Image (cartoon, helix red, strand yellow):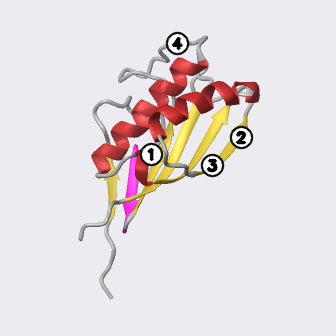
């Protein structure tokens, strides 16, 4: 039986990790994307008071990581969304539809008191599969 390779991804358009992790890890046909917030390449939260803008940037960051790994939103199997205010769910869901289109991944929403970056209102992580190569 062949050994599956573990691959790490660091994406130039994403801010440097604030701890000991990388943007994504692929193993076999799966890609595990670390939690992304609405920050730019410097790590600055773009719109501290706008959860929609933050969600859009967070999903753009997820998309950049997925692309670097060779996949996209259509192959996302599971997302986890962390919100500092669960009442923002409907607004964030509108943004999710922009990025996922007709693809509907499994999903978990978790309300949290705070995120690692003080102005962050939303963080999104994902598990995706690589597209078939045949």
Image height check: is 37 above or below 2? above
Viewer-nearest residue: 42 or 83 = 83
Label 3: element kind: strand
Q: Choose the circle earlier in sequence order: 1 or 2.
A: 1
Residue topped by disc 3: 107
The residue where tag 1 is placed is 21
Image spot of residue 124 (x, y percent): 55, 38
Structural distance between the alpha carbons of marks 3 and 2 = 10 Å
**Which of the two discs, 3 and 4, sits closer to the camera?**
3
Q: Is residue 88 visible from the viewing direction of this image?
A: yes
Location of mark 2 (residue): 110
Sequence-wise, the earlier of marks 2 and 4 is 4
Q: Which one is in front in this view, the residue at disc 1 or the one at disc 2?
A: 2
Question: Which of the pair 43/53 is nearer the observer?
Answer: 53
- Is residue 119 in view? no
Cα separation between marks 1 and 2: 21 Å
Disc on res. 47 = 4
Quadrant of residue 119 within the rendered picture: top right
């Amino acid at each position: 039986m062949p050994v599956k390779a573990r691959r790490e991804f660091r994406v130039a358009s994403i801010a440097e990790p604030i701890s000991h992790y990388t943007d994504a890890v692929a193993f076999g046909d799966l890609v595990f994307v670390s939690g992304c917030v609405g920050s730019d390449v410097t790590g600055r939260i773009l719109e501290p008071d706008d959860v929609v803008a933050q969600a859009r940037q967070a999903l753009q960051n997820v998309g950049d990581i997925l692309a670097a790994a060779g996949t996209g939103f259509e192959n996302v199997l599971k997302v986890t969304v962390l919100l500092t205010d669960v009442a923002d769910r409907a607004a964030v869901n509108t943004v999710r539809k922009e990025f996922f289109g007709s693809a509907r991944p499994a999903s978990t929403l978790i309300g949290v008191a705070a995120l690692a970056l003080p102005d962050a209102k939303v963080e999104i992580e994902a598990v995706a599969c690589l597209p078939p190569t045949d």
